[in-house]
Amino acid sequence: MLYLLHGTDINKKQKERIKILDLLSKKFTNTEKVSFGDVVFDITNIESLISSQGLFGKRFLVSFDHVLENENIADVLLERLLRMSESENIFIFSENKILKEILKKFEKTGAEIQEFPLLKKTEKENVFAIANALERKNKKEIWIIFNKLTNSGIPSEKILGILFWKTKDMMLRRNLSVGGQKFSEAKLKSLSSQFLSAYHDGHGGGLTVSERVEKIILKEL
């Protein structure tokens, strides 16, 4: 089994790798994690991991960190990609930038590939547009921006965090409206509490974080 996680958003990429490793550890109860970098690299050991069939159903979860940036190492590993994909052990590559020809080689093996691009400045600025809409108490605008952000791939948790921060900011500044209808302090406290609950409850089953935020926007604003 073969995975490729690539892109310059290091935090998201790292979280995804941890998530994959945790899921695989639960799926295969007898596992062992092994890591290689461009400094710690042993082709003999790697060859053994590709070929080995673990005793008592044991599987190795093998992580490679930015090894393909080294041309010599890349050449050695790329010629073994197909065998890695067919191995009983699992191989996970984590890379920043990856060449198109290398990406094609992963695609040919049927590897699971995910890209994690770092948001551009304009995208980051757009995320805060929903905070401005909340301060104006413009329900329609909040709803439109929320859907645009989620459809563009912005995590609902990130949007929720901004909405939660904005309610706190408005309470602290006691600036409860800007060119729009005024929020009562009690309403802001209620929204703050609901946003916080949406985050925790959204990870505990039932409605997702996104669905809970939608419900607050539609019913409470």
Image (spheres, grey):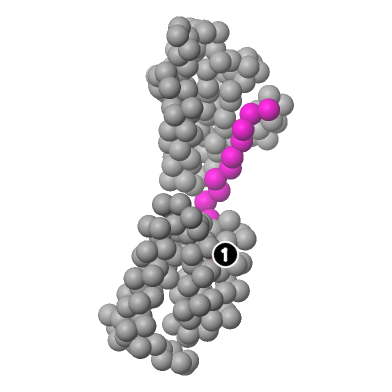
Q: Who's the residue at 45% across and 38% down the image?
A: 19
The residue range painted magenta reads 110-123
Q: Position of residue 157 (x, y in %)?
A: 45, 59
Give the farthest residue toward the front.
Answer: 206
Seen at 42% across and 63% down, the residue is 198
In magenta segment, residue 6: no
Image height check: is 16 above or below 30? below
118 to 129, vertically: above or below: above
Look at the image and say whether residue 121 sits in the magenta stretch: yes
The percent position of residue 193, horizontal first and vertical second, equals: 34, 71
For the residue pair 209 and 145, the one nearer the viewer reads as 209
Q: Secondary structure at mark 1?
A: helix
Q: Quadrant of residue 153?
A: bottom right
| Disc 1: CA contacts within 10 A as few (<14), some (14-19) or many (>=20) | some
Residue shown at the point (62%, 20%) measured from the top left: 85
Q: Is residue 72 visible?
A: no
> Label 1: which residue?
149
Where on the picture, by quarter, is residue 76?
top right
In front: 98, or 5?
Answer: 5
Q: Is residue 108 rendered to the left or right of residue 83?
A: right
Q: Is the N terminus in the top left, top right, bottom left or bottom right quadrant? A: top right
> The disc labelled 1 sits on which kind of residue?
Leu
**Does residue 112 appear anywhere in the picture?**
yes
Number of marks in the rendered image: 1
**Residue depicted at 44% across the width and 65% down the height:** 160
In this rendering, position of residue 147 left or right of residue 216: right
Q: Position of residue 73 (x, y in %)?
A: 53, 19
